[in-house]
Image (cartoon, rainbow, N blue to C red):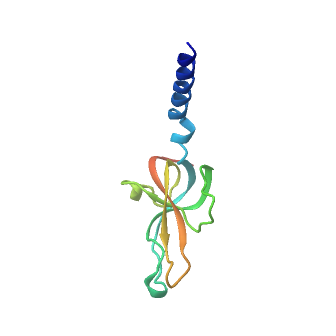
Amino acid sequence: MQNNKYFLFVFILFLTGCSNPAEQNSNQVVSEGTVNYYIAPPAVGGETDPTGYIIANAKWLSGEPKYLHGRVYITDGELSAYVSKRVRVTGTIDSLTAGGVETPERKFPLIKAVSIEEIK
C-alpha cells in the first residue's frame, strides 16, 4: 500500500508539471502602435539594422522584452493593408539581431502576429 501512495504522488507531480499553461504561453505578447515600413539606412561595414514592418510608438500591453530596443518589428502576410494605421497586435515574440563585428550588436523584438486589430 505504501508503494501505491508513493507512485500516486509522483504521478500527480508529473501531471501538474506537464500541464502548466503559464509556461506554454510565456512568449505571447500584445502591443499597440502604428504600422510603418522601415527602410534601414546604409551602415558601417554593411551592418545595417533590419528592413521591414515595424510598430512605431509601440505600447506594450503584455510581454514586453526585458532588453532595450529601438524598434519593434512585426511579421504577418497582410501588413501592407495596415501601413499608417494604429493597430493592436497579438502574437508570439522572437527577436532579430544586427551588428556585432564593426558595430555593437543590437537586438530587436519581432512579433509574429496571430491577430491584428485596427484601433482608433
Task: Looking at this view, name the residue that lies furthest to the front.
Answer: 2
| Residue at point 51%, 28% (across, down) | 15
The answer to whether residue 119 of the structure is visible from this angle is no
Q: Is residue 35 above or below residue 23?
A: below
* Residue 68 sits in quarter: bottom right
The one nearer the camera, 103 or 114, is: 103
Residue nearest the observer in this picture, 78 or 20: 20
Is 35 or 19 nearer to us in this picture? 19
**Where 41 falls versus 22 (above or below)?**
below
Q: Position of residue 62 (x, y in %)?
A: 61, 48
Residue ID at (54%, 18%): 3
Quadrant of the image containing the N terminus: top right
The number of numbered badges drawn on the structure is: 0
Q: Tell me which residue sits at (52%, 22%) in the image.
A: 7
The percent coordinates of residue 24 (x first, y second) are 51, 40
The image shows residue 13 at horizontal and vertical percentages of 56, 29
Q: Residue furthest left?
A: 77
Task: From the top left corner, tell me how far across and down residue 114 is, in percent.
Answer: 44, 46
